[in-house]
Image: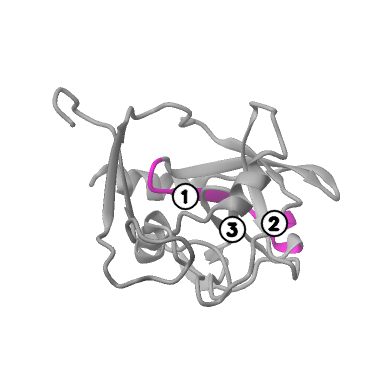
Amino acid sequence: MASGRNEGILKLIVTRGSGPRGYRASGRERATRIATLHALGLGIPAAAVRVRLCTTPVSVNAHLAGLKTLNRLDSVVARAEWRNARIWEGLMGDPDGNWVCGTMSNLFVRRGALLTTPLLNRCGVAGVMRRWVLENAAGVGLRVEQRPIRSEDLMSAEEIFMSNAVVGIRSVSAIERTPAGTVRIPCMDAAGQLRARLDLL
């Protein structure tokens, strides 16, 4: 499948497999594995990105928190909220007003040497790039804290960046549709240092 390609995005999907109608498993299913290969670079921004606040919340289910499953309807609905090509991503919150993630990415907020990312104990996806950032933040002088992120944390941030396995780490230059209008994010230092370390891999 990858013949003739030097780079690309390999997507792996594993399902329970075919079975009878209904939700109950028979125990005789055989897993279905699907692999798709995609070109690298389509829609991946090189510079800092603009994001917006979404009104669609993330569904809360502590039993599934952190897992990447095929049930991404929340993200599908949130992504339909805008068509402006200048906006790369949308931030999604939980029903309690905490900002949890992007429609396809994890969220990081920096103020001074403290790097904060949402605690994903009730909802959200614990992405592999998020884990890499948590493991490498100390190497660029950052202290990490996982806790709920409120709107005031976004408004007072010195730096915000997003991450996922395809785009790596992307600095946020502005947040749109906040109560204060468009908020500019002044700094991209930590994200740049982390990207430099990532590029060495």
Give the label, 3 or 1, closer to the camera: 1
- How far apart are the two marked residues, 2 and 3, measured between alpha carbons? 7 Å
Outermost residue to the left: 3
| Residue 17 found in image quarter | bottom left
- List the residue tagged with mark 1: 163
Q: Residues within 10 Å of mark 1 (few under 14, many from 20)?
A: many
Q: Which amino acid type is shown beneath numbered disc 3?
A: Val
Outermost residue to the top: 4
Residue 171, horizontal then vertical, whole percent: 53, 43
Q: Which amino acid type is shown beneath numbered disc 2?
A: Leu
- List the residue tagged with mark 2: 154
Q: Are marks 2 and 3 in contact (CB under 8 Å)?
A: yes
Q: Which residues are magenta?
A: 152-166
Q: Are marks 1 and 2 in contact (CB under 8 Å)?
A: no
| Residue 51 found in image quarter | top right
Q: Is residue 181 left or right of residue 77?
A: right
Q: Is residue 101 left or right of residue 164?
A: right
Residue at (45% x, 59% y) in the render: 69
- List the residue tagged with mark 3: 109
| Residue 116 found in image quarter | bottom right
Quadrant (top left/top right/bottom left/bottom right) for the N terminus: top left
First in sequence: mark 3 vs mark 1: 3
